[in-house]
Image (tube, rainbow, N blue to C red):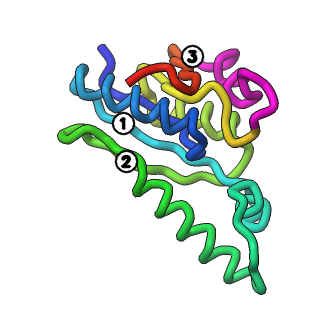
């Protein structure tokens, strides 16, 4: 029985598609969702990956990154009645996702085929989670559904 769904989300088009599919699945199964965003350990590196710029101080970088995250989460639509939480971690994305699998104990992970980097059809984090996850992983390419 699927009761908990982990949804790694970096706000790329693929991860937003995965969030939509995970939401529909959670609604059908009466499951709860946990969104997980993994940021680089450095605010500046995380901000640059998000294509944020124009900072004059570390404090400005930090504030801009927090605004960006809040704005991105505000765009994620979860079906009414589906309970969900957001978690933000810092570190190496695939390692943090695998750690979250062991601590949150979802029955399935729903994630995009690749993240913000558009180098290859299946991103390195997705490939790593697929290889190492003890639970099923549903990989959603862009344009895959709903």
Quadrant for residue 108, please give it: top left
Mark 2–mark 1 Cα distance, whole angstroms, equals 7 Å
Q: Using the image as rendered, state which of residue 133 and residue 68 is in the foreground.
A: 68
The reply to whether discs 2 and 3 touch (Cβ–Cβ < 8 Å) is no
* Residue that appears at 49% across and 26% down: 110
SS class of the residue under badge 2? strand
Residue 90 colored in magenta in the image:
no
Which x, y percent locates residue 120?
79, 25
Mark 2 Cα shell of 10 Å, populated few (<14), some (14-19), many (≥20): few
Q: Which one is earlier in the sequence, the residue at label 1 or at label 3?
A: 1
Magenta region: which residues?
118-133
Q: Position of residue 133 (x, y in %)?
A: 61, 19
Which residue corresponds to mark 1?
33
Q: Residue at coordinates 26% horizontally, 38% vertically from top-left?
A: 79
Percent x, y for residue 22? Answer: 39, 28
The numbered disc on residue 134 is 3
* Quadrant placement of the N terminus: top left
Query: In whole angstroms, how far apart are the C-alphas of marks 2 and 3?
Result: 22 Å
| Helix, strand or loop status at disc 1 | strand
Q: Residue at x 23, y 21 (%)?
A: 28
Going from the N terminus, do you reach mark 2 or mark 3 first? 2
The quarter of the image holding the C terminus is top left
Q: Which mark is residue 85?
A: 2
Cα distance between the residues tagged 1 and 3: 18 Å
Tell me the element at label 3.
loop
């Amino acid at each position: 029985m699927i009761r908990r769904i982990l949804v790694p989300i970096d706000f790329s088009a693929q991860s937003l598609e995965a969030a939509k599919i995970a939401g529909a699945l959670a609604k059908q199964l009466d499951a709860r969702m946990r969104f997980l965003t993994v940021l680089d350990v450095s605010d500046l590196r995380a901000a640059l990956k998000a294509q944020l710029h124009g900072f004059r101080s570390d404090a400005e970088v930090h504030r801009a990154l927090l605004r960006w995250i809040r704005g991105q989460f505000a765009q994620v639509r979860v079906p009414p009645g589906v309970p969900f939480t957001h978690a933000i971690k810092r570190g190496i994305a695939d390692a943090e996702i695998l750690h979250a699998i062991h601590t949150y104990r979802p029955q399935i992970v729903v994630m995009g085929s690749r993240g913000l980097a558009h180098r290859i059809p299946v991103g390195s984090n997705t490939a790593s989670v697929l290889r190492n996850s003890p639970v099923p992983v549903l990989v959603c390419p862009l344009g895959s559904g709903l």
